[in-house]
Image (cartoon, rainbow, N blue to C red):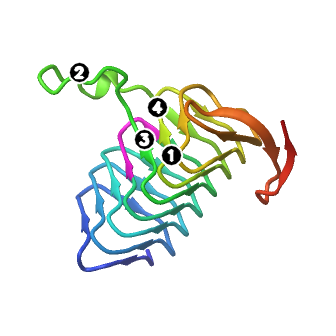
Amino acid sequence: MSYYVHESSYIDENVKIGNNTKIWHFCHIQSGAELGEGITLGQNVNISNNVKIGNNVKIQNNVSIYEGVIIKDGVFLGPSCVFTNDLTPRAQYPKGRDNYVQTVVEEGASIGANATIVCGHRIGKYAMIAAGAVVTKDVPDYALCMGVPARVCGRVDEQGNIIEMS
C-alpha cells in the first residue's frame, strides 16, 4: 500500500487505507475504519470505529465522522461539517453502537462548511448542501439544499453547477 500519514496523526489497529490517500496533521483513524483510494483528510479529522469511506473523497479540517455514517465515492465534506449518530443522546444512559442511526452520503455529494447532518438520512447522489444548513430529512439526488432546517431550493449537475433555482 502507498499512502501518506503525517507524524502527528494516529492510526489504530485493524484499519484499511487505500493507495494515494493522504492523512494530514492531528487526525485519528479508529479501529475497523476502511478508507478507500485517493482520499484527502485535512487537519484534525476523526474517523470513528467501523466507518466506511469510498474512493476520491475530500474531507476538510475539523470533521468527525461517527460510527454509522457511510461516505460513498467522490464526496466532498467542507470544513467543520457535523454528523450525528444518535437522535436522543444522553451521557448517563449511552445506548451503544447497536442503536446508532445510519446516515449515507451518496456518490459525488458535497456538504458545505459548518453544515449539520442529523442521523438517519440519505444525502442523494451529487446533492449539494449549503454551508451552515441543518439536514433533518432525506435529500434527493442532485438537490441543492439551504437553510435551517435545510430545504430543497434548486438542482445541480454532477460538476456542481446550479441548473435550477426554485
In percent of the image, x 42 and y 55: which residue is there?
80
Viewer-nearest of discs 1 and 3: 1
Number of residue marks: 4
Q: Is residue 58 left or right of residue 91?
A: right
Q: Disc 1 or 3, which lies upstream in sequence?
A: 3
Q: Residue at x 55, y 69 (%)?
A: 38
In space, the residues marked 4 and 2 are separated at their CA atoms by: 17 Å
Q: Amino acid at mark 3?
A: Phe
Circle 4 is placed at which residue position? Answer: 118
- Is residue 31 magenta-colored? no
Instruction: Give the labeled residue for mark 2.
Output: 95
Q: Measured along the vertical axis of the image, is residue 93 above or below residue 8?
A: above
Name the quadrant containing residue 76. bottom right
**Which mark, by number, is residue 115?**
1
What secondary structure is marked by label 4? loop
- Which residue is drawn at the image coordinates 84% and 36% (left, top)? 166
Structural distance between the alpha carbons of marks 1 and 4:
10 Å
Which tag, 2 or 3, sits closer to the chain's start? Answer: 3
For badge 1, the amino acid type reads: Ala
Q: Amino acid at mark 2?
A: Lys
Q: What is the CA distance from the residue labelled 2 to the residue labelled 3? A: 17 Å
Q: Residues within 10 Å of mark 4 (few under 14, many from 20)?
A: many
Q: Position of residue 130 (x, y in %)?
A: 62, 48
Q: Are marks 2 and 3 in contact (CB under 8 Å)?
A: no
Furthest toward the right, the residue is 163
Q: Are circles 1 and 3 on residues that touch, CB within 8 Å?
A: no
Residue behind mark 3? 83
CA–CA distance in space, label 3 to label 4: 6 Å
Give the magenta part as a residue range: 64-69
The mark that comes first in sequence, 3 or 4, is 3
Front residue of 105/15: it is 105
Query: Viewer-nearest of labels 2 and 3?
Result: 3
